[in-house]
């Protein structure tokens, strides 16, 4: 997890992870907070890597490359993602999938602001056209990866890293499954400006899609 001022939700998320994995998960938080998020995370057993805030992708890239485990899972720390579905993701990886990506839009994502929901549908359409393959939710924060997938690709994006983490594996022939998940209303305030952030994500999707076409 990349964490930034999520003191309100981080304890709940970590407790949920601990419960569904029987305490066997190694949790890594890359943190640039000015509140007590890192202290709370450490109190609940997470490894915290402190860094100056440099954006979503910089933090998540560090987080996914740090654990020495065969399966790496990403999630957000705002309590929007259903940790109770995490065993389903691991089961699909064990069945042979390389990436399992949570599809928030499958059930409607009513807890998501309407503007964001529209943007995420638009991102999926753009990515689908560029990839020549239907994708449904490019910017979800809940995914499971075989470690060799995240190690084998040079990740370049920051705000748009979530889309890149789906698009490059798909374009390179990895076995990717989009799996429906429930999506809840976040705890705490969002850090992403919907217009500025949305434009940055759209730019990343186009850049990654074109790069993969001509790689």
Image (cartoon, rainbow, N blue to C red):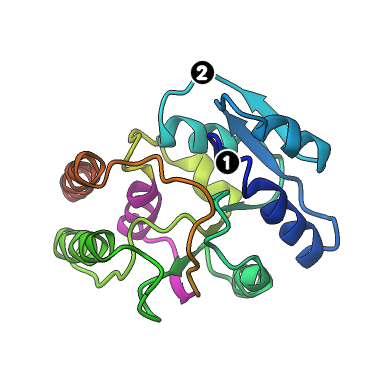
User: Residue 60 at x, y = what percent?
Assistant: 50, 38
Depth check: give the residue in front, 59 or 72.
Answer: 59
Q: Is residue 135 above or below residue 63?
A: below
Depth check: give the residue in front, 210 or 4.
Answer: 4
Q: Quadrant of residue 105?
A: bottom left
At 37% from the left and 42% from the top, the residue drawn is: 161
At 14% from the left and 64% from the top, the residue drawn is: 129
Q: Is residue 142 above or below residue 150?
A: below
Q: Is residue 171 magenta?
A: yes
- The residue that mark 1 highlights is 6
SS at mark 2 in the image: loop
Q: Is residue 40 magenta?
A: no
Residue 52's disc is: 2
Task: Say which quadrant the N terminus sits in.
Answer: top right
Q: CA distance from mark 2 to mark 1?
A: 15 Å
User: Residue 121 at x, y = what percent?
Assistant: 23, 67
126 left or right of 97?
A: left
At 17% from the left and 66% from the top, the residue drawn is: 125
**Which residue range is magenta in the image?**
162-181
Q: Residues within 10 Å of mark 2 (few under 14, many from 20)?
A: few
- Sequence-first disc among 2 and 1: 1
Q: Quadrant of residue 195?
A: top left
At 48% from the left and 41% from the top, the residue drawn is: 152
* Label 2 vs label 1, nearer the camera: 1
117 left or right of 62?
A: left
């Amino acid at each position: 997890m990349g964490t930034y001022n999520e003191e309100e939700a981080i304890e709940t998320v970590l407790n949920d992870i601990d419960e569904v994995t029987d305490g066997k998960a190694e949790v890594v938080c890359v943190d640039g907070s000015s509140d007590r998020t890192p202290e709370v995370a450490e109190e609940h057993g997470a490894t915290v890597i402190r860094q100056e805030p440099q954006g979503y992708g910089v933090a998540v890239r560090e987080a996914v490359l740090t654990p020495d485990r065969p399966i790496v899972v990403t999630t957000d720390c705002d309590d929007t993602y259903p940790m109770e579905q995490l065993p389903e993701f691991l089961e699909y990886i064990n069945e042979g999938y390389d990436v399992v990506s949570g599809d928030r839009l499958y059930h409607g994502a009513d807890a998501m602001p309407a503007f964001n929901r529209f943007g995420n549908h638009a991102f999926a359409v753009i990515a689908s056209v560029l990839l020549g393959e239907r994708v449904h939710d490019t910017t979800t924060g809940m995914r499971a990866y075989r470690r060799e997938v995240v190690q084998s690709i040079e990740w370049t994006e920051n705000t748009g890293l979530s889309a890149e983490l789906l698009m490059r594996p798909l374009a390179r022939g990895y076995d990717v499954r989009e799996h429906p998940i429930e999506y809840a209303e976040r705890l705490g305030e969002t850090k992403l400006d919907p217009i500025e952030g949305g434009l940055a994500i759209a730019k990343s999707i186009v850049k990654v899609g074109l790069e993969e076409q001509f790689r």
